[in-house]
Image (spheres, grey):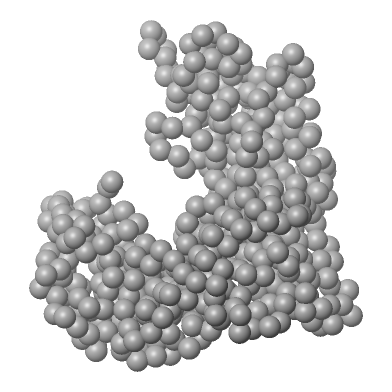
Amino acid sequence: MAIPDTIHKESLQALAFAARQHKGSDLDPAELLIYMQDLGVAPPGVSNSFKIDYSRMQREFAIWVNGATTPKARQDLMSWVNSSVWIANRALTTSYFKGNDYIFYQSGEIDQFRGSYVKLAKKVQRDSIDPQVRRVYAIASKGTGDKWNPADVLALKSGKASNIEREMTAFGNGNSQYEKSHQSTLQEKNEELVRMFGPQNKHLKIIEDMDDIYWYNQYIDDLYKSGDCIPISLKKAESSSIRITSYDHKETKGIQDALTLNLTIDNVDWKENAQKCIVEFSLAGESGHMLDIRGSESSRKIADVQMQLQYGRAAAHGKTTLPTFSLIARMSKANSSILAQRRERSRIFGTNVKFPGSREHMFTNWRIFDDYARKTDGSTFSQSSLILDAPKWARYIEWLSNRSVNQDVIMRQFNRFLGSGSRLDYFSAAKFLKHKVQSYEVGFVMDKHQTQVREIVKENILKSIYSMASSKGFRIFGEDFITDYMTSSSYLKLGG
């Protein structure tokens, strides 16, 4: 694992919070560097106030500092040290933090926080009688649960930490005293929403299968508002002017806020000379927002593209996956766009070529391109057929882009990746095609020039993607309804 990785950056921030709290005044980057070189020199007031993988960070913080021997490496190190110091100095002076008796946990050191959500989500997937709900939670229960709450660090009141951890565990085990003490149901909450918004012909509904998750959210929100447990999502700070955003998801506030989500698609930039495409959109009338669709797998692997929200030059505003996009498109009634893609692909390749479907989504299966890269047996998708099929894929890509990108340009790029001579690079060439095909298939669904689905449906799909990627929840938007399948819990976002 490279240093620094996510765990190092989160642990560094937890250390900076603890050091700033103990000092009681602004922390200096030089002080944080001293602790990084040897965690053992931290006084008890610091060392008792953070929870990280201590033995590992004792070793790897020092490697990080001592390994920064070039100007570039030193600059990178100090950018993270400065960011951690700036965030700690600013955050601990706000009203979100009540006093100076917090323990700061790197997110992996309090497994039950997101672990209980994952357990509850898997229970919904297993027990719901609604196949649509099961499909949503097949996605929502995967991974660490960071789309439910993206906290990188949690600040817990030291005198209450043990009780909070026990209650979090109890939620996951189905015996929460907090939930038992609250008698209202999601059916009653939905009836409230009907009374509030029915006269406006707006139908807001929370899926009742997520009852346990709803109450876990309320527990986290109560802790957040009282200052007893503050989930903190971090974005790297570029200056001491720190952006602070509170995400308040108390009760039905999340779905009510979704009513005001004003989003319009401006353009699809097909990025002729890059292995991706970008959906450009405006949010609340502000242009410059983007959904960047690209491959993000490791250099020697082929896998599905992912999607990342960006604003201007700032990246990492949230990510989501191709299976999530596919499910949202299906639930939003955009199947005709996918069917058009399949018809054109079959027309180009011929109906005798059978494309293996993906178990995860409705788009072209990445395994086809993995077979192109690795198989040498002369089968339908193998190294020998890759060279023959490449012009067909180029025509398909040109069609997906509404002729914005010429197939000859695609073939020149393909041949550049493939190379020449006796050692052809089948892997790089196949991976290039995979990036182009999958990203353009997503772009095709969102392209305003395509008429298979109406523009309002495309914008509703993007609203759902935006909500999921930015950790607001899994929601399906319709012309006169919003259905909330999974609401994220409350948290504080610092930096960015």
Residue 270 x, y percent position in the rendering: 61, 41
Image-based side of 405 in relation to 53, left or right: right
Residue 253: x, y in percent?
66, 78
Q: Quadrant of residue 99?
A: bottom left
Decide: is 451 above or below 312: above
Q: Who's the residue at 42% across and 19% down the image?
A: 425
- Image position, residue 350 (x, y; %): 75, 16
Q: Residue at x 39, y 31 (%)?
A: 300
- Dividing the picture into quarters, in which one does residue 4 lie? bottom left
Q: Is residue 384 above or below residue 138?
A: above
Name the one closer to the observer, 473 or 90: 473
Residue 433: x, y in percent? Answer: 55, 28
Q: Quadrant of the C terminus?
A: bottom left
| Picture residue at 26% right of the left edge, 62% below the top | 53
Residues 337 and 483: in front is: 483
Q: Is residue 61 visible?
A: no
User: In percent of the image, x 83 and y 70: which residue is there?
Assistant: 203
Instruction: Please tell me whether residue 103 is drawn above or below residue 284 in the rendered image.
Output: below
Residue 362 seen in this snapshot: yes
Q: Is residue 383 left or right of residue 455?
A: left
Query: Quarter-wise, where is residue 248 in the image?
Result: bottom right
